Each structure stands twice: as structure tokens, then as C-alpha cells.
Amino acid sequence: MAGGGRQGRIVAALACTAAPVSLLPGLGAAWAVPYTDPKPPRPEVLHSRLGALESALVDDRGRLFFTSQTWDEPMRGAVLRLDRPDADPVPIARDIESPGGLALDERGQLIVGFGDSVPGGLIGNIVGRAGLLVIDLDTGDRQTWVSGLGMANGIARAADGTVYASNDVGTHIERIEPGGDVQRRWAKLWSANGLAIDPTGRYLYAAQTFTRSAIRRIELANPANITTHASPDLAGAAATLDGMTIDRSGRLYVAANGAGQIWRVDTDGTIRALARGLRFPTAVALGRGPHGFSEGNLYAVTLRGEILGVPGAAR
């Protein structure tokens, strides 16, 4: 999921036809994990009705960028920018085919996955039809950087410019070299979604969606070395993990889409809930800098078109 094409997904169908999973009788309680704090911060709805939101990140200037997979104008297949929580969203690109993951390159330009849909991802296990765009944040100009990927659902960029891309209905994670060469079957991992690289640059973390909930750790120098970093007990086994990010200390933050929660995963693999009762969170982003979407706060987007703030959750 932290990627796109949600209208065709199981959770998307639930979102269109039912109450949030976390509010359905019995399911929310069954999937709950403990709070990090006896008095956790209350999530704030900053914006709503923005379509099916897929991914999010905050840049060094404290601006939030996010993708919408809605079919409706003016946000159809759009990448949008929010300069501060009370500002109006500004589209910087439209009509992208199923926009997926987001990352920033060394020049501060936006890398955007496209082709993030379930049919595309299934076909992408055989013939890749997805790829990566690069968008200039000042002009909105865009160009295709890479094509032939399986889905480009979640993406993560290493310090050396290497990019990793996931397919949540796929069998492998892909590796894209700085020059654009693609290693299609770099690491074998079923239903990888949100990706994050640890601060040491040694490991890639991957959250899994359509399997037992877990976050796996992959050694970049030896992708056959895959271990379990964190996995909830049976109560959280079907949480359908989605987008994920990491802070400077190595703590992970992950959207537990089906459970309607946001989790923090500490460096020892301990899982705690930062927020519950959400409506299908798809991605999380850490605040940065002193202004706008500022440091110390956590932000999330949802399949139901909401942008949420969780004040102080990343301190």
C-alpha cells in the first residue's frame, strides 16, 4: 500500500464500504498495541477530502509533500505541497499514473514513483511497467528517470544515491543505481511496502502488508541476509503495515493501515502505538526544521483523504 492504486485493494474496498477497521466491533481492540505514553498526543485533522492519499514527506524547509490517487480533478494523480499546516494544498504535478512513493534527491528534487496499482504490481512481477519521475520543486517540470519497475510503491534513497523500490503485491525489492540501472530481483521479500534506510547506511527496513505484520531488516551489502526486526504478537498480526519512515536515532514510524494506528518501533524492536482510531493511515512523515511542519511532530496521510498531525510524537 504505501504506494498506490488503492481502488483495487482489499483495504480500499473496506474504506469505501465500511467504517474504519479500527472502529469495527472487536477488530480495533484485537489489533491494538500498547500506547507509548499513558497520555498520548491526540491526532489533529489538519486537512480532509483530498482523495486517496498515498505517501508523504517533509523537506528541510518544513514543507509537506504528498500524493493523491483520486480520479477527480483537480487532484487526479497529483503531487501536492503544503507550506504549513494551515495553508492550502498546492498541486505541483498532476495526471501521474498511480503516484507511489516519495524521496528527495541530492539536489532537493522530488523522486516520485508511478504505476503504483494492484494490477500493475501483479504484472510487475513478470514485466515491470512502473517507474520513477524526478520533479523540479521550483518549476514543476518532470522527467522520467527510471522505467520498468514492478510498482514503486515505497521508495527509499541511500546517501550514495541508490534507490530501493517495493511492490506490496510482489515478491522482490528492486535496487536502482544512481545512473538508473535497475536490479529487478535484488532482495526476495513478499509484499514489501514502506522502506527506510537506517542512519548507519548498513540496513534497509521493509514493512510488509499482505502477510503477517512484520518489519524486516535487509543487509545492503548482502541482501540475502534478511532478519525480523519487529513483529507484533498475534493481536497485531493482521495490521496490514503501510508507509514507514525513520528518525536520526534509528526509531521507525509505520502506518498500520488496517489497524487504524501509527506505531513507533524502537531500535530493540519494541512496538508501541502513537495513535489509534485512524481511518486507514497510509504513510507517515517526520517534521523537519523550526517552521511549517516542524521537527518533533509526526504527520500522517490517510486513504480517506486526511492529513493528520500528531504533536510531539517524534521527540
Image (tube, grey):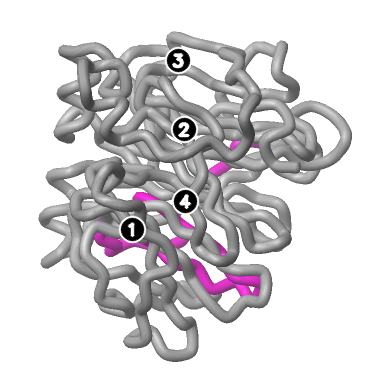
Residue ID for mark 1:
214
Numbered disc in front, either 1 or 4: 1
Q: CA distance from mark 1 to mark 4?
A: 29 Å
Q: Are marks 3 and 4 in contact (CB under 8 Å)?
A: no
Magenta-colored stretch includes residue 142 = yes
- Using a 10 Å C-alpha cutoff, classify the residue at mark 3 as few (fewer than 14 neighbours), some (14 to 19) or many (20 or more): many
Q: Nearer the viewer, residue 172 or 96?
A: 172
- Left or right: 236 in relation to 247: left
Instruction: Residue type at mark 4: give it.
Output: Leu
| Magenta highlight range | 139-165
Residue ID for mark 4:
133
Numbered disc in front, either 2 or 4: 2
Quadrant in the picture for residue 129: bottom left
Residue ID for mark 3:
50
Q: Point out the image quarter for the C terminus.
A: top right
- Left or right: 123 in relation to 204: left
